[in-house]
Image (tube, rainbow, N blue to C red):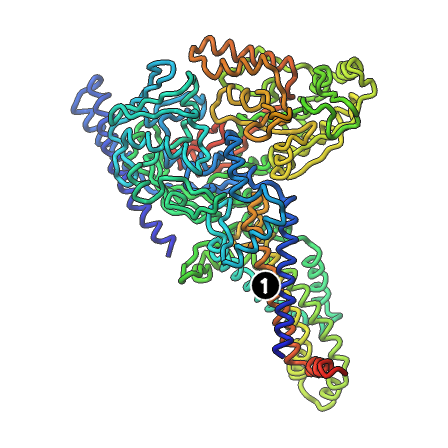
Amino acid sequence: MYARSLGGKTRVLGAGGAANKRLRGVGFMLGQSVARIGVVASLAMATAMAVVLAAPAQAKTLKWASQGDLNSADQYMRNQTLSLSIMSHVYEGLIRRDPKTLAIEPALAERWEIAEPTRWRFYLRKGVKFHDGRPFTADDVVFSAQRALGKGSDLKGRLPANVVVKKVDDYTVDFITEKPNPILHYEWTTWGIYSKGWAIDNKATEVADPSKGDAPNAATTQANGTGPFKLVSREADVKTVFAVNNDWWGKDKYKHNVTEVIFRPITSAPTRVAALLSGEIDFMEPVPVQDIDRINKNKGTKVVTAPETRIVFFGFDHEHKELLHSSVKGKNPFKDVRVRQAFLQAIDIEAIKTKVMRNLALPSAMMVAKGFEGWDVAFKRLPHNPEAAKKLLADAGYPNGFEVQLDCPNDRYVNDEAICQAVVGMLQRAGVKINLVTKTNTVLFGEYQKFETSFYMLGWAPGSYDSWNPLEFLHRSVPVDKDGKSKPGGTFNYGRYGNPKVDALIDQIGQETDKKKRDQLLHDAWKTTIDDVAYIPLHQQMIAWGSRDSIAKLEPHAGNELLWYHVMMK
Amino acid sequence: MIAYIVERLFQSLLVLVAVALIAFAVFQYVGDPIASMVGPDTTAADIARMRENLGLDKPVVVQFARFIGNVLSGKFGVSLRTVKPVEELIAERLPATLELSGMAALFALAFAIPLGVLTGLKPNHWASRVFMAVSLVGISLPTFLIGILLILLFGVVLGWLPTFGRGDVVKIGFWTTGLLTVSGWQSIILPAITLGLFQLTLIMRLVRSEMLEVLRTDYIKFARARGLTNRAINFGHALKNTLIPVITITGLQLGSIIAFAIITETVFQWPGMGLLFLQAVQFADIPVMSTYLLLIALLFVGINLVVDLLYYLVDPRLRADRGAMERGV
């Protein structure tokens, strides 16, 4: 019964799409051919084109699966990639990014300028309508800012603290910040604009907070954005259905032919692979490394890989006077930069890439991915050299090495546990005995937060595609309370690396609006932290997407988002 | 009689409280729900606020008391992962699990009894030997492997059945059923076989050994001497007498089918309570985990209570003993 009613809806939408395409075809052909061959010929051709264009515009359903479900239809509830990415098709931001180059493109804002260092002015797109027909205006932007900064929202970081969002007129909004902020809008792809009127009518002006035991509100199960797709129905952990928005302002710019999207979570990886092979779904991610060959060999399916922006790395305890988990008593060997460098040079990154990751990794010398602002090809990784590592350890006073515990998640990153096992052997050759402890990430990251680890693995993927975020969250020194103890929370600098010079640079980077000067500051900051061997970056893991030949074209996305408005189905 | 029931109920209550307490103690090691709930730029103040809201800053005993208090007042909390009231979430998932468990039990019984009778009557027949050998596989292979093998064979290679999910469902009041649609029936076949296979082999072996036992008894010999047909002897007399332990075991196994549907549901992405529980564990979703465990404990306690009460009704010796005790003999 359910399926039938849905099918009916799809057909209606398909017909609308046909009519739209026909109109577009005429307009396009007219413009081009007046200059070339003449009006009569072009009209004839345009009509022919329109017929051709109209014919294939039938229902195209994109069925895809991921390992988890989106947590809520409310985009502001969880700052989590899958939820944000799926709901960004419904709730659009003021900007969006090109999936390939990651360059910022206008979305709900047509253009913007920095009027004063602390005042940004955004000019909004006119004539945009929400899915329920309400017009999009500056009031909605002001309201969405309040909502994102308000109670229960997990997107507070999208806007700087104490920002004032002011409506200038119906289509102009000012963002007034306390300090200059060069990257104000960098993460706004995933800060979607809500309709003020809709939120008020549906009593969803605030985000429901499950930690307070709030009951869900209308926005947790329904959605009303301006985006290319509308939320049709949602059954948590079963399926979520979207239909194309034929009135989308961007449909001429972003060519796609998807009329319906069915998203389903499939937790178990072998089942996900089987569903792709059997043709029940058109797309799925992530593909387990060991199944890539199989999917590629199977007729009609293939795996698309591209480097992901996440950097997987090792961190050290820079702070404790005596390591919590080590044979060295009375002092902390990781306070000595020679020891940290010895660890870095003991690790054979090429072996990890080829043997453990089966070439599905891009080794990195930096704590940011290629393509980020601040990434620089000039930074090279110190070469793998066990002899040099041994010598460095001896110079530091550990000619016979020492023992230390390595904490490693076993369910968070691609082959995380296997990487750590390989590293145990590599460090052994330099004389360091590693006690490897692997745990599920929910447990382990809780221990990290309490600063209880000596040597650990973590990954980091900033949504801003800019260096400031990893500098601020991984490299800024951790404030101490009046007893001199580090205050946990709000930071991911679990090893409490600290360098006053870097702190000062981070402050400047956060405020410098001149691109050239900022680039220099970024370079200085990375140079200092790399010389300090603050962390051991390993690699960018590859995203592995499995797709069927029912999909003619899709854009791999460095942020691991499948953007439906870039998909062409056969 | 009343005293007996009250005593059993009181014991059941103790079991439930014990389960809840143990569950709460274990949750301390499942992980930190806050870590799953926050994103990379959640502020320290927000994290502290959430911790306080959830009561995670309090000692385990206080958290436990708070949970029991809430349960007694009918509040099971809101799922941290899906942001839905837990009772609503479980009510939504219960039909899927019950339908799957029911079908698995039916499948197990439908094959186990005839096969058990066959292998019992003709223990040396080649077919019996084959069934016995195959049944070893059913007992020894882990459930997830059986599930994946079935998916590969019937879903991928042959393409006959869906590889995951529950198909289209129809809503009847609060109950959603997949048994009224074609895709629903197609979807339930593989998970039901996966879940029921272990029970099938267990019951088949039980029926077989009971049959072998019963066929040796005197009344069967006398029946044969009287010249009754084989059919009447085997099914009318022998099978009937084997069924008493079979029914007991099947009843008890039904509880474990429901409780252990976790793996099958995960392999087939079956939207039941088991999958819900597994995802709750991964997320450290404490309200869902605690309610689920309590519900399963209630299920087992309930089944045991019913069995105990049935014994009381069926077995007069139990009543006599109690009467004797009460008289002080």
Q: Give the position of the C terminus of chain A as an image quadrant.
A: top left
Left or right position of A547 against A44: right
Left or right position of A402 against A356: right
Q: Which element carries disc 1, helix, strand or loop?
A: helix
Q: Residue at x 69, y 27 (%)?
A: A455
Q: Is any part of residue B188 visible from this angle?
A: yes
Q: Residue at x 55, y 39 (%)?
A: B34
In the orientation shown, which residue stands out farthest toward the bottom?
Answer: B226
Residue B228 in the image: x percent, y percent?
Answer: 68, 88
**What is the chain identity of the residue bearing mark 1?**
B
Which corner quadrant of the image does residue B192 belong to?
bottom right
Q: Badge 1: how crowded within 10 Å, few (<14), some, or many (20+)?
A: some
The residue beneath circle 1 is B299
Q: Is any part of residue A279 visible from this angle?
A: no
Number of numbered markers? 1
Residue A156 in the image: x percent, y percent?
Answer: 44, 31
